[in-house]
Amino acid sequence: MKVLFVGGSGVISSACSRLALERGIELWHLNRGHSSVLRPVPGVRHLQGDIRNEPSVREALKGHRFDAVVDWVAYVPAHVEADIRLFAAITDQYVFISSASAYQTPPDRLPVTEDTPLDNPVWQYSRDKIECERVLEKAFASSGFPYTVVRPSHTYDPSLIPVEGGYTVISRMLRGKPVVVHGDGTSIWTLTHHRDFAKGLVGLLGKREAIGQSYHITSDEWLTWNQILMALGKAFGKEPDLVTIPSRIIARYHTAIGDSLLGDKTASMIFDNSRIKALVPEFRCEIPFSQGAREIAEWHQSHPECCVIDPELDALFDRIIEDYG
Protein backbone atom coordinates (compact mmCIF):
# COMPACT_ATOMS: atom_id res chain seq x y z
CA MET A 1 0.00 0.00 0.00
CA LYS A 2 0.92 3.62 -0.50
CA VAL A 3 -0.29 5.72 2.44
CA LEU A 4 -0.12 9.41 3.32
CA PHE A 5 -0.08 10.73 6.88
CA VAL A 6 -0.88 14.41 7.26
CA GLY A 7 1.42 14.96 10.21
CA GLY A 8 2.97 11.75 11.44
CA SER A 9 5.56 12.45 14.12
CA GLY A 10 3.23 13.11 17.05
CA VAL A 11 2.60 11.00 20.16
CA ILE A 12 0.20 8.59 18.46
CA SER A 13 1.14 8.97 14.81
CA SER A 14 4.85 8.27 15.29
CA ALA A 15 4.12 4.72 16.51
CA CYS A 16 1.69 4.22 13.63
CA SER A 17 4.34 5.45 11.21
CA ARG A 18 6.92 2.98 12.51
CA LEU A 19 4.52 0.04 12.39
CA ALA A 20 3.34 0.94 8.89
CA LEU A 21 6.94 0.92 7.67
CA GLU A 22 7.62 -2.40 9.42
CA ARG A 23 4.68 -3.89 7.53
CA GLY A 24 6.03 -2.79 4.18
CA ILE A 25 3.73 0.15 3.58
CA GLU A 26 5.13 2.92 1.39
CA LEU A 27 4.54 5.73 3.85
CA TRP A 28 4.59 9.42 3.08
CA HIS A 29 4.30 12.34 5.50
CA LEU A 30 2.88 15.69 4.46
CA ASN A 31 4.21 18.52 6.61
CA ARG A 32 5.84 21.91 6.42
CA GLY A 33 9.34 20.47 6.40
CA HIS A 34 9.97 20.38 10.13
CA SER A 35 11.53 17.17 11.39
CA SER A 36 10.72 15.72 14.81
CA VAL A 37 13.59 15.76 17.27
CA LEU A 38 11.76 13.78 19.95
CA ARG A 39 10.07 11.23 17.68
CA PRO A 40 12.07 10.75 14.46
CA VAL A 41 10.69 8.17 12.03
CA PRO A 42 13.44 6.98 9.65
CA GLY A 43 12.27 5.56 6.35
CA VAL A 44 9.35 7.89 5.73
CA ARG A 45 9.12 9.74 2.41
CA HIS A 46 8.20 13.41 2.64
CA LEU A 47 5.99 15.88 0.85
CA GLN A 48 6.36 19.50 1.83
CA GLY A 49 3.21 21.56 2.14
CA ASP A 50 1.13 23.41 4.70
CA ILE A 51 -2.19 21.59 5.19
CA ARG A 52 -3.77 24.95 6.07
CA ASN A 53 -2.70 26.30 2.67
CA GLU A 54 -4.58 24.37 -0.03
CA PRO A 55 -2.55 25.61 -3.01
CA SER A 56 0.70 24.46 -1.41
CA VAL A 57 -0.79 21.02 -0.73
CA ARG A 58 -2.18 20.67 -4.24
CA GLU A 59 1.25 21.40 -5.61
CA ALA A 60 2.85 18.83 -3.30
CA LEU A 61 0.29 16.15 -4.22
CA LYS A 62 0.72 16.41 -8.00
CA GLY A 63 1.23 13.00 -9.55
CA HIS A 64 0.37 11.09 -6.36
CA ARG A 65 -2.44 8.71 -5.51
CA PHE A 66 -2.79 6.94 -2.16
CA ASP A 67 -4.55 3.82 -0.96
CA ALA A 68 -5.24 5.67 2.29
CA VAL A 69 -4.80 9.14 3.76
CA VAL A 70 -4.78 9.73 7.53
CA ASP A 71 -5.14 13.29 8.80
CA TRP A 72 -3.73 13.58 12.33
CA VAL A 73 -4.20 17.34 12.57
CA ALA A 74 -7.82 18.03 11.56
CA TYR A 75 -9.67 19.65 14.44
CA VAL A 76 -12.56 21.74 13.10
CA PRO A 77 -15.07 21.29 10.25
CA ALA A 78 -13.18 23.65 7.93
CA HIS A 79 -10.14 21.34 8.12
CA VAL A 80 -12.19 18.34 7.07
CA GLU A 81 -13.95 20.26 4.32
CA ALA A 82 -10.55 21.20 2.89
CA ASP A 83 -9.42 17.57 3.11
CA ILE A 84 -12.44 16.45 1.12
CA ARG A 85 -11.55 18.90 -1.62
CA LEU A 86 -7.88 17.86 -1.58
CA PHE A 87 -8.14 14.08 -1.31
CA ALA A 88 -11.49 12.97 -2.75
CA ALA A 89 -10.01 12.26 -6.17
CA ILE A 90 -6.73 10.71 -5.06
CA THR A 91 -7.47 8.23 -2.26
CA ASP A 92 -9.57 5.14 -1.66
CA GLN A 93 -9.80 5.75 2.10
CA TYR A 94 -9.66 8.87 4.23
CA VAL A 95 -9.12 8.29 7.95
CA PHE A 96 -10.21 11.05 10.30
CA ILE A 97 -8.71 11.03 13.78
CA SER A 98 -11.58 12.04 16.02
CA SER A 99 -11.68 11.59 19.81
CA ALA A 100 -13.37 9.30 22.30
CA SER A 101 -14.14 12.47 24.24
CA ALA A 102 -16.83 13.06 21.62
CA TYR A 103 -18.95 10.34 23.21
CA GLN A 104 -21.80 11.23 25.55
CA THR A 105 -20.27 12.83 28.65
CA PRO A 106 -21.02 11.44 31.17
CA PRO A 107 -22.19 8.25 29.43
CA ASP A 108 -25.61 6.83 30.30
CA ARG A 109 -24.14 3.34 30.39
CA LEU A 110 -20.88 1.46 30.26
CA PRO A 111 -19.07 0.09 28.39
CA VAL A 112 -19.05 2.70 25.67
CA THR A 113 -19.53 1.35 22.15
CA GLU A 114 -19.27 3.10 18.78
CA ASP A 115 -23.07 3.44 18.90
CA THR A 116 -22.95 5.53 22.10
CA PRO A 117 -24.32 8.99 21.20
CA LEU A 118 -21.85 11.76 20.44
CA ASP A 119 -22.61 14.53 22.91
CA ASN A 120 -20.12 16.53 24.95
CA PRO A 121 -21.75 19.62 26.48
CA VAL A 122 -18.55 20.86 28.13
CA TRP A 123 -15.47 20.67 25.91
CA GLN A 124 -15.32 22.69 22.68
CA TYR A 125 -12.53 20.46 21.35
CA SER A 126 -14.90 17.49 21.50
CA ARG A 127 -17.82 19.34 19.98
CA ASP A 128 -15.63 20.39 17.07
CA LYS A 129 -14.63 16.75 16.49
CA ILE A 130 -18.32 15.78 16.47
CA GLU A 131 -19.04 18.41 13.83
CA CYS A 132 -16.12 17.12 11.75
CA GLU A 133 -17.69 13.67 11.81
CA ARG A 134 -21.02 15.15 10.67
CA VAL A 135 -19.28 16.76 7.68
CA LEU A 136 -17.86 13.36 6.69
CA GLU A 137 -21.20 11.61 7.07
CA LYS A 138 -22.82 14.14 4.72
CA ALA A 139 -20.00 13.79 2.17
CA PHE A 140 -20.33 10.01 2.26
CA ALA A 141 -24.09 10.22 1.76
CA SER A 142 -23.90 12.76 -1.06
CA SER A 143 -20.82 11.66 -3.01
CA GLY A 144 -19.50 8.45 -1.47
CA PHE A 145 -16.45 10.10 0.07
CA PRO A 146 -14.66 7.05 1.54
CA TYR A 147 -14.12 8.03 5.16
CA THR A 148 -13.28 6.02 8.27
CA VAL A 149 -13.45 7.57 11.74
CA VAL A 150 -11.02 6.55 14.47
CA ARG A 151 -11.64 7.71 18.04
CA PRO A 152 -8.57 7.44 20.30
CA SER A 153 -9.02 7.83 24.00
CA HIS A 154 -6.13 8.80 26.29
CA THR A 155 -3.10 7.54 24.32
CA TYR A 156 0.44 8.16 25.55
CA ASP A 157 4.08 7.47 24.69
CA PRO A 158 7.19 7.57 26.91
CA SER A 159 7.56 11.32 26.41
CA LEU A 160 4.00 12.09 27.56
CA ILE A 161 3.00 12.05 31.23
CA PRO A 162 -0.75 11.37 31.01
CA VAL A 163 -1.95 13.55 33.90
CA GLU A 164 -3.00 17.19 34.01
CA GLY A 165 0.16 19.16 34.68
CA GLY A 166 2.64 16.74 33.13
CA TYR A 167 6.14 16.85 34.59
CA THR A 168 5.12 19.50 37.10
CA VAL A 169 3.10 16.76 38.84
CA ILE A 170 6.08 14.39 38.81
CA SER A 171 8.28 17.13 40.22
CA ARG A 172 5.83 17.64 43.07
CA MET A 173 6.03 13.92 43.84
CA LEU A 174 9.82 13.99 43.84
CA ARG A 175 9.90 17.04 46.09
CA GLY A 176 7.43 15.49 48.56
CA LYS A 177 4.72 18.05 47.78
CA PRO A 178 1.05 16.95 47.70
CA VAL A 179 -0.40 16.04 44.31
CA VAL A 180 -3.91 17.06 43.27
CA VAL A 181 -6.17 14.28 41.99
CA HIS A 182 -9.60 15.21 40.71
CA GLY A 183 -12.76 13.93 42.35
CA ASP A 184 -12.07 11.24 44.91
CA GLY A 185 -9.55 9.54 42.63
CA THR A 186 -11.69 6.43 42.13
CA SER A 187 -13.27 7.12 38.74
CA ILE A 188 -12.17 4.54 36.17
CA TRP A 189 -9.99 5.56 33.24
CA THR A 190 -8.43 3.93 30.19
CA LEU A 191 -4.85 4.65 29.12
CA THR A 192 -3.54 3.21 25.85
CA HIS A 193 0.14 2.88 24.90
CA HIS A 194 0.79 4.32 21.44
CA ARG A 195 2.43 1.10 20.21
CA ASP A 196 -0.73 -0.84 21.07
CA PHE A 197 -2.93 1.77 19.39
CA ALA A 198 -0.83 1.52 16.24
CA LYS A 199 -1.82 -2.10 15.69
CA GLY A 200 -5.46 -1.10 15.41
CA LEU A 201 -4.94 1.98 13.24
CA VAL A 202 -2.53 0.38 10.77
CA GLY A 203 -4.76 -2.69 10.62
CA LEU A 204 -7.65 -0.53 9.36
CA LEU A 205 -5.70 0.88 6.41
CA GLY A 206 -6.93 -0.46 3.11
CA LYS A 207 -9.94 -2.25 4.64
CA ARG A 208 -12.96 -1.62 2.44
CA GLU A 209 -15.19 -2.85 5.26
CA ALA A 210 -14.10 0.18 7.30
CA ILE A 211 -15.51 2.73 4.86
CA GLY A 212 -18.34 4.72 6.40
CA GLN A 213 -17.61 3.22 9.84
CA SER A 214 -16.22 4.45 13.15
CA TYR A 215 -13.89 2.68 15.57
CA HIS A 216 -12.42 3.49 18.93
CA ILE A 217 -9.06 1.89 19.64
CA THR A 218 -8.30 1.62 23.34
CA SER A 219 -6.81 -0.63 25.97
CA ASP A 220 -8.92 -3.09 27.95
CA GLU A 221 -7.05 -2.22 31.15
CA TRP A 222 -9.11 -0.12 33.56
CA LEU A 223 -7.44 1.97 36.25
CA THR A 224 -8.58 4.53 38.78
CA TRP A 225 -6.82 7.89 38.79
CA ASN A 226 -5.38 7.02 42.19
CA GLN A 227 -3.85 3.89 40.64
CA ILE A 228 -2.49 5.87 37.68
CA LEU A 229 -0.73 8.37 39.94
CA MET A 230 0.55 5.65 42.26
CA ALA A 231 1.97 3.77 39.26
CA LEU A 232 3.79 6.90 38.12
CA GLY A 233 5.11 7.48 41.62
CA LYS A 234 6.40 3.91 41.81
CA ALA A 235 8.12 4.27 38.43
CA PHE A 236 9.83 7.49 39.53
CA GLY A 237 10.71 6.03 42.92
CA LYS A 238 8.51 8.25 45.11
CA GLU A 239 5.11 7.41 46.58
CA PRO A 240 2.84 10.43 45.99
CA ASP A 241 0.85 12.21 48.67
CA LEU A 242 -2.54 12.44 46.93
CA VAL A 243 -5.02 15.20 47.79
CA THR A 244 -8.48 14.83 46.29
CA ILE A 245 -10.22 17.96 45.00
CA PRO A 246 -13.60 18.03 43.17
CA SER A 247 -13.21 18.66 39.44
CA ARG A 248 -15.56 21.64 39.55
CA ILE A 249 -13.39 23.28 42.19
CA ILE A 250 -10.26 22.76 40.05
CA ALA A 251 -12.13 24.23 37.06
CA ARG A 252 -12.70 27.48 38.96
CA TYR A 253 -8.94 27.97 39.17
CA HIS A 254 -7.88 26.83 35.67
CA THR A 255 -10.31 26.89 32.75
CA ALA A 256 -8.30 24.72 30.35
CA ILE A 257 -7.67 21.98 32.91
CA GLY A 258 -11.27 22.27 34.05
CA ASP A 259 -12.62 21.78 30.53
CA SER A 260 -10.38 18.75 30.07
CA LEU A 261 -11.53 17.26 33.38
CA LEU A 262 -15.24 18.00 33.14
CA GLY A 263 -15.38 17.29 29.43
CA ASP A 264 -13.32 14.12 29.43
CA LYS A 265 -11.67 12.76 32.55
CA THR A 266 -14.11 13.16 35.42
CA ALA A 267 -16.59 10.45 34.41
CA SER A 268 -15.55 6.81 34.34
CA MET A 269 -14.89 5.55 30.81
CA ILE A 270 -14.73 1.89 29.84
CA PHE A 271 -14.72 0.91 26.16
CA ASP A 272 -16.00 -2.14 24.33
CA ASN A 273 -13.39 -2.84 21.62
CA SER A 274 -15.33 -5.62 19.90
CA ARG A 275 -15.70 -3.73 16.62
CA ILE A 276 -12.01 -3.06 16.01
CA LYS A 277 -11.09 -6.59 17.14
CA ALA A 278 -13.56 -8.12 14.69
CA LEU A 279 -12.06 -6.30 11.70
CA VAL A 280 -8.43 -6.29 12.88
CA PRO A 281 -7.89 -9.60 14.71
CA GLU A 282 -4.23 -8.81 15.39
CA PHE A 283 -5.23 -5.85 17.54
CA ARG A 284 -4.35 -6.62 21.15
CA CYS A 285 -3.23 -4.23 23.87
CA GLU A 286 -0.26 -5.90 25.52
CA ILE A 287 1.44 -3.04 27.39
CA PRO A 288 0.00 -2.45 30.89
CA PHE A 289 0.36 1.00 32.37
CA SER A 290 2.78 -0.36 34.98
CA GLN A 291 5.21 -0.97 32.08
CA GLY A 292 4.24 2.27 30.36
CA ALA A 293 4.94 4.22 33.55
CA ARG A 294 8.43 2.70 33.74
CA GLU A 295 9.05 3.71 30.11
CA ILE A 296 7.91 7.25 30.95
CA ALA A 297 10.27 7.43 33.92
CA GLU A 298 13.23 6.03 31.96
CA TRP A 299 12.61 8.42 29.07
CA HIS A 300 12.44 11.48 31.30
CA GLN A 301 15.51 10.43 33.25
CA SER A 302 17.42 10.24 29.97
CA HIS A 303 15.97 13.55 28.68
CA PRO A 304 16.51 16.01 31.56
CA GLU A 305 16.04 18.90 29.15
CA CYS A 306 12.38 17.88 28.86
CA CYS A 307 11.81 17.73 32.63
CA VAL A 308 10.34 21.21 32.76
CA ILE A 309 8.37 22.55 35.73
CA ASP A 310 5.67 25.15 35.17
CA PRO A 311 6.17 27.44 38.19
CA GLU A 312 2.78 29.12 37.78
CA LEU A 313 0.97 25.78 37.67
CA ASP A 314 3.02 24.51 40.59
CA ALA A 315 2.00 27.55 42.63
CA LEU A 316 -1.61 27.13 41.52
CA PHE A 317 -1.69 23.57 42.82
CA ASP A 318 -0.38 24.86 46.15
CA ARG A 319 -3.12 27.50 46.26
CA ILE A 320 -5.90 25.04 45.37
CA ILE A 321 -4.78 22.66 48.11
CA GLU A 322 -4.46 25.46 50.66
CA ASP A 323 -7.84 27.04 49.77
CA TYR A 324 -9.79 23.82 49.60
CA GLY A 325 -8.11 22.23 52.57
Image (cartoon, rainbow, N blue to C red):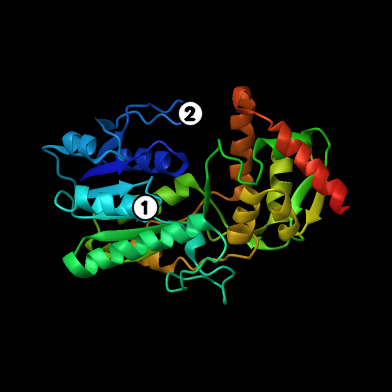
Percent coordinates x, y for residue 205 in the rendering: 28, 53
Please name whichever residue, 14 or 182, is drawn nearer the observer in this view of the structure: 182
Numbered marks: total: 2
Q: Amino acid at mark 2?
A: Leu
Task: State the residue at coordinates (24%, 44%).
Answer: 3
Name the residue tied to disc 1.
Answer: 201
Question: CA–CA distance between discs 1 and 2?
Answer: 22 Å
Q: Which residue is mark 2?
A: 38
Q: Is residue 255 left or right of residue 54?
A: right
Asked if one can make out residue 170 in the rendered structure from this viewpoint, the answer is no
> Which circle marks residue 256 in the picture?
none
Residue 248 percent coordinates (x, y) = 72, 60
Report the front residue among 75 and 168.
75
Foreground disc of the pair 1, 2: 2
- Mark 1 and mark 2 in contact? Answer it, CB < 8 Å: no
Residue density around tag 2, few if under 14, some if 14–19, many if 20 or more, within 10 Å: few
Q: Quadrant of residue 303?
A: top right
Horizontally, residue 31 falls left or right of residue 114, namely: left
Identify the element where label 2 is drawn.
loop
> Residue 112 placed where, x, y %?
51, 70
Residue at image location 59% in from the left, 37% down from the top: 295
Q: Position of residue 78 (x, y in %)?
A: 33, 52
| Secondary structure category for the residue under label 1 | helix
Q: Residue furthest left?
A: 63
Residue 255, visible in the rendered structure = yes
The three-letter amino acid code for the residue at tag 1 is: Leu
Query: Which residue is found at the position 13% from the left and 37% from the top?
Result: 62
Which of the 4 quarters of the picture holds residue 277? bottom left
Closer to the chain start, of discs 1 and 2, is: 2
